[in-house]
Image (cartoon, rainbow, N blue to C red):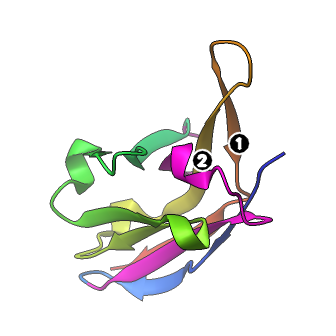
Protein backbone atom coordinates (compact mmCIF):
# COMPACT_ATOMS: atom_id res chain seq x y z
CA UNK A 1 0.00 0.00 0.00
CA UNK A 2 1.29 3.41 -0.97
CA UNK A 3 0.15 6.55 0.78
CA UNK A 4 0.90 9.92 -0.76
CA UNK A 5 0.94 13.10 1.28
CA UNK A 6 1.03 16.43 -0.50
CA UNK A 7 2.10 19.75 0.94
CA UNK A 8 2.85 23.25 -0.21
CA UNK A 9 -0.43 24.60 -1.47
CA UNK A 10 -1.66 28.07 -0.66
CA UNK A 11 -2.42 31.52 -1.99
CA UNK A 12 -0.02 33.18 -4.39
CA UNK A 13 -0.20 36.25 -6.57
CA UNK A 14 -0.16 35.98 -10.34
CA UNK A 15 3.41 35.90 -11.59
CA UNK A 16 4.63 34.35 -8.39
CA UNK A 17 6.01 30.92 -7.58
CA UNK A 18 4.89 28.01 -5.46
CA UNK A 19 6.40 24.64 -4.75
CA UNK A 20 4.53 21.45 -4.01
CA UNK A 21 5.84 18.28 -2.43
CA UNK A 22 4.47 14.76 -2.35
CA UNK A 23 5.96 12.18 -0.04
CA UNK A 24 5.29 8.47 -0.18
CA UNK A 25 4.54 7.25 3.32
CA UNK A 26 5.97 5.15 4.78
CA UNK A 27 9.21 5.65 2.89
CA UNK A 28 9.15 3.23 0.02
CA UNK A 29 12.25 1.24 -0.89
CA UNK A 30 10.74 0.69 -4.33
CA UNK A 31 9.89 4.38 -4.82
CA UNK A 32 12.59 4.74 -7.45
CA UNK A 33 10.60 2.40 -9.70
CA UNK A 34 7.38 4.41 -9.49
CA UNK A 35 6.11 6.67 -12.20
CA UNK A 36 5.11 9.87 -10.42
CA UNK A 37 2.85 12.62 -11.62
CA UNK A 38 0.85 15.69 -10.77
CA UNK A 39 -2.74 16.33 -11.81
CA UNK A 40 -5.09 19.17 -11.04
CA UNK A 41 -8.81 19.72 -10.85
CA UNK A 42 -11.14 22.69 -10.64
CA UNK A 43 -14.83 22.55 -9.66
CA UNK A 44 -17.00 21.20 -12.42
CA UNK A 45 -14.11 20.02 -14.53
CA UNK A 46 -12.37 16.70 -14.97
CA UNK A 47 -9.02 16.09 -13.37
CA UNK A 48 -6.29 16.95 -15.84
CA UNK A 49 -2.70 15.90 -16.28
CA UNK A 50 -0.01 18.43 -15.37
CA UNK A 51 3.38 16.71 -15.33
CA UNK A 52 5.02 13.33 -14.84
CA UNK A 53 8.46 11.88 -14.21
CA UNK A 54 9.46 8.27 -14.65
CA UNK A 55 12.16 6.10 -13.07
CA UNK A 56 14.71 7.34 -15.62
CA UNK A 57 13.93 10.93 -14.63
CA UNK A 58 12.36 11.55 -18.02
CA UNK A 59 9.67 14.21 -17.76
CA UNK A 60 6.57 15.20 -19.67
CA UNK A 61 4.37 18.25 -19.22
CA UNK A 62 1.04 19.64 -20.16
CA UNK A 63 1.54 22.19 -22.93
CA UNK A 64 0.23 25.10 -20.91
CA UNK A 65 2.75 24.58 -18.09
CA UNK A 66 5.81 23.27 -19.94
CA UNK A 67 7.89 26.45 -19.76
CA UNK A 68 6.75 27.34 -16.24
CA UNK A 69 6.55 24.20 -14.13
CA UNK A 70 9.28 21.73 -13.24
CA UNK A 71 8.73 18.25 -11.86
CA UNK A 72 11.54 16.50 -10.02
CA UNK A 73 12.05 13.62 -7.65
CA UNK A 74 14.30 12.64 -4.77
CA UNK A 75 14.27 8.88 -4.49
CA UNK A 76 16.21 8.92 -1.23
CA UNK A 77 13.34 10.87 0.32
CA UNK A 78 10.56 9.07 -1.59
CA UNK A 79 9.36 12.50 -2.65
CA UNK A 80 8.30 14.17 -5.86
CA UNK A 81 8.18 17.92 -6.31
CA UNK A 82 6.43 20.39 -8.56
CA UNK A 83 7.98 23.83 -8.83
CA UNK A 84 5.52 26.27 -10.34
CA UNK A 85 6.74 29.62 -11.65
CA UNK A 86 5.02 32.49 -13.43
CA UNK A 87 1.72 31.34 -12.04
CA UNK A 88 -1.51 32.44 -13.67
CA UNK A 89 -5.04 32.63 -12.27
CA UNK A 90 -5.98 29.72 -14.55
CA UNK A 91 -3.50 27.55 -12.63
CA UNK A 92 -5.83 27.74 -9.63
CA UNK A 93 -6.86 24.20 -8.77
CA UNK A 94 -6.54 21.37 -6.34
CA UNK A 95 -3.30 19.62 -7.21
CA UNK A 96 -3.08 15.87 -6.77
CA UNK A 97 -0.03 13.67 -6.61
CA UNK A 98 -0.19 10.33 -8.41
CA UNK A 99 1.96 7.21 -8.27
CA UNK A 100 1.93 4.48 -10.91
CA UNK A 101 3.20 1.27 -9.33
CA UNK A 102 3.90 -1.91 -11.23
CA UNK A 103 1.91 -4.93 -10.11
CA UNK A 104 3.89 -7.80 -8.67
CA UNK A 105 3.85 -11.01 -10.65
CA UNK A 106 1.67 -9.78 -13.50
CA UNK A 107 1.54 -7.01 -16.05
CA UNK A 108 -0.16 -3.78 -15.23
CA UNK A 109 -0.05 -0.77 -12.99
CA UNK A 110 -1.86 0.29 -9.87
CA UNK A 111 -2.47 3.97 -9.32
CA UNK A 112 -2.43 5.80 -6.03
CA UNK A 113 -3.58 9.34 -5.28
CA UNK A 114 -2.84 11.89 -2.63
CA UNK A 115 -5.54 13.87 -0.89
CA UNK A 116 -4.87 17.01 -2.91
CA UNK A 117 -3.61 20.46 -2.03
CA UNK A 118 -5.25 23.71 -3.09
CA UNK A 119 -3.30 26.30 -5.02
CA UNK A 120 -5.02 29.63 -5.49
CA UNK A 121 -3.51 32.21 -7.81
CA UNK A 122 -4.90 35.70 -7.35
CA UNK A 123 -4.94 38.20 -10.18
Location of residue 49 with respect to 2 vertically, above or below: above
- Determine which of the numbered discs, if any, sits on residue 65 in the image: none
Dot 1: within a 10 Å radius of its alpha carbon, few (fewer than 14), some, or many (20 or more) residues?
Answer: some
Q: Is residue 77 visible?
A: yes
- Local packing at callout 2 (Cα closer than 10 Å; few below 14, some 14-19, many 20+) is many
| Quadrant housing residue 54 | top left
Q: In this view, does 15 lie to the left or right of 95?
A: left
Label 2 sits on a secondary structure element that is strand
Which corner quadrant of the image does residue 99 belong to? Answer: top right
Q: Where is residue 115 in the image (x, y as percent from the top left)?
A: 74, 58
Location of residue 50 with respect to 48 vertically, above or below = below
Above-or-below relation of 30 to 106: below
The N terminus, quarter of image: top right
The quadrant of the image that shows the C terminus is bottom left
Residue at image x 43%, y 79%? 19
Tag 1 residue: 112
Measured as percent of width and height from the top left, residue 27 is found at 73, 66
* Highlighted range, magenta: 16-45
Quick one: which residue is furthest to the left in this view?
67
Q: Is residue 58 left or right of residue 18?
A: left
Labelled pair 1, 2 in contact (Cβ < 8 Å): yes
Residue matched to label 2: 98
Tell me the residue at 78%/50% (across/down): 2
- First along the sequence among labels 1 and 2: 2
State the SS at label 1.
strand
How many marks the image carries: the answer is 2
Residue toward you, 95 or 13: 95
Residue at 33 percent across and 51 percent down: it is 57
The answer to whether residue 43 shows anywhere in this view is: no
Amino acid sequence: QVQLVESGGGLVQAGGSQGLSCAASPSQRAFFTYGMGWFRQTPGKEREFVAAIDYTFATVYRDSVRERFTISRDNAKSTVYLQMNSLKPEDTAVYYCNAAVALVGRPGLRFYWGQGTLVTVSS
